Amino acid sequence: MSNQLPDFLTGTWLQRYHVGFEGDRVGSFGVAPIRPVLIPFLFTQPYVRLSVDSIQKKTNWTFGARVYQTITTQLGFEDVISEHTLDLGKPEIINMLLFPDGYRLKLSFPTWLVDVDIVIHEYIEAN
């Protein structure tokens, strides 16, 4: 495949993850920040299409998440091998580094978000 990203709407995009999260209530003080999420799926293809959105977002909020591409080490730790940022409410295709044993994604969110909806698709190249 060339260095050009696949088409956003056509081709074989398989949904690998779609989950929403809310921050935990902290008594009468409000809502705690949403904890980082390690996606429980092993990705094996270079292209992923990610979207992070929030129902309660304000119009001036643009930053949605930091995406960490990780691989599992021999000691069982998750080492970060690349890092990307996502805008809130703007789906994006990211070209990830490939490893023989696959990779995982970890997302962390800004402290002001009280809810997030995460959608991740993996592009499957036709042979």
Image (cartoon, rainbow, N blue to C red):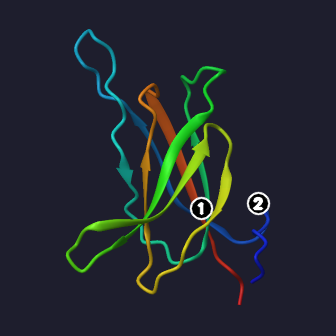
In the drawing, what numbered circle is on residue 8? 2
Q: Earlier in the sequence, mark 1 or mark 2?
A: 2
**Residue with the mark numbered 1:** 121
Compare residues 82 and 16 and report the one nearer the observer: 82
**Residue 11 placement (x, y as % from top left):** 76, 71
**Crowd band around label 2 with a 10 angstrom C-alpha radius: few (<14), some (14–19), many (20+):** few
Query: Going 57% across and 69% down the picture, which residue do you hit?
Result: 96
SS assignment at label 2: loop
Residue 121: name its quadrant.
Answer: bottom right
Residue 8: name its quadrant.
Answer: bottom right
Q: Give the left or right position of residue 40, taking residue 49 as reference.
A: left
Query: Going 65% across and 21% down the picture, which residue do you hit?
Result: 60
Compare residues 63 and 123 and report the one nearer the observer: 63
Q: Is residue 89 above or below residue 51?
A: above
Query: Going 70% across and 72% down the picture, which residue do you hit?
Result: 12
**Residue 64 placement (x, y as % from top left):** 55, 38
Q: Quadrant of the C terminus?
A: bottom right
**Crowd band around label 1 with a 10 angstrom C-alpha radius: few (<14), some (14–19), many (20+):** some
In the drawing, what numbered circle is on residue 78? none
Q: Is residue 93 above or below residue 108?
A: below
Query: Going 41% across and 83% down the picture, which residue do you hit?
Result: 101
Q: Give the left or right position of residue 22, taking residue 127 as reference.
A: left
SS assignment at label 1: strand
**Residue 28 placement (x, y as % from top left):** 26, 9
Q: Is residue 105 above or below residue 108?
A: below
- Amino acid found under the numbered disc labelled 2: Phe
Q: Quadrant of the N terminus?
A: bottom right
- Amino acid found under the numbered disc labelled 1: His
Compare residues 10 and 23 and report the one nearer the observer: 23
